[in-house]
Each structure stands twice: as structure tokens, then as C-alpha cells.
Image (cartoon, rainbow, N blue to C red):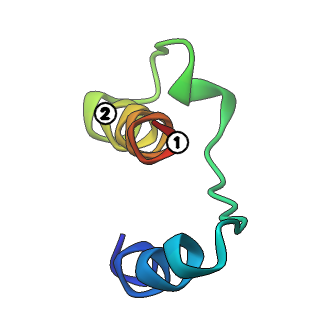
């Protein structure tokens, strides 16, 4: 998140940019691996979608 905040103004000035965030499949589907792990993956996916808008 911090690096996204830092580069976002640069991307806006250029009119383009690419940010790659990596999450496991647990970011799309819940599992039995534990609530904290699943919640963190959902957070990465949600953050990425939000920044995309």
C-alpha cells in the first residue's frame, strides 16, 4: 500500500502505470487455512480493485 501511494501521483502525471499485487486463490474463495490468512488475501484483492477504479 505504501509503494502504491508513492507511485500513484507519478502514474497520474504520466497518464499510465502498472502495479502488480500478488495474492493466493484464497483471495477469491474462503478456506480452512485460517480466518486471518483469508482476510489478508481478501484485503489485497479488494485494495487492488479499489485502486483500479
Q: Does residue 41 lie above or below 8 as drawn?
A: above
Residue at numbered disc 2 = 39
- Regarding mark 1 in the picture, which secondary structure is present there? helix
Q: Does residue 30 lie above or below 5 as drawn?
A: above
Q: Does residue 9 lie above or below 19 as drawn?
A: below
Foreground: 51 or 1?
A: 51
Residue at screen point 40% across, 31% down: 42
Residue at screen point 67% across, 27% down: 25
Foreground: 13 or 28?
A: 13
Q: Where is residue 30 in the image (x, y as percent from the top left)?
A: 46, 13
Report if the CB atoms under discs 2 and 1 are less than 8 Å apart. no
Residue at screen point 39% across, 38% down: 50
> Where, quadrant-wise, is the N terminus in this rendering?
bottom left
Q: Nearer the viewer, mark 2 or mark 1?
A: 1
Residue at numbered disc 1 = 52
Residue at screen point 42% across, 80% down: 9
- Whether residue 19 sits left or right of residue 50 in the image: it is right
- Whether residue 20 sits left or right of residue 8 in the image: it is right
Of the numbered discs 2 and 1, the one sitting upstream in the chain is: 2
- Regarding mark 2 in the picture, which secondary structure is present there? helix
Amino acid at each position: 500500500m505504501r509503494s502504491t501511494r508513492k507511485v500513484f501521483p507519478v502514474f497520474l502525471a504520466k497518464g499510465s502505470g502498472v502495479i502488480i499485487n500478488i495474492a493466493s486463490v484464497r483471495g477469491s474463495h474462503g478456506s480452512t487455512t485460517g480466518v486471518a490468512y483469508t482476510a489478508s488475501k481478501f484485503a489485497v484483492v479488494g485494495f487492488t480493485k479499489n485502486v483500479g477504479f
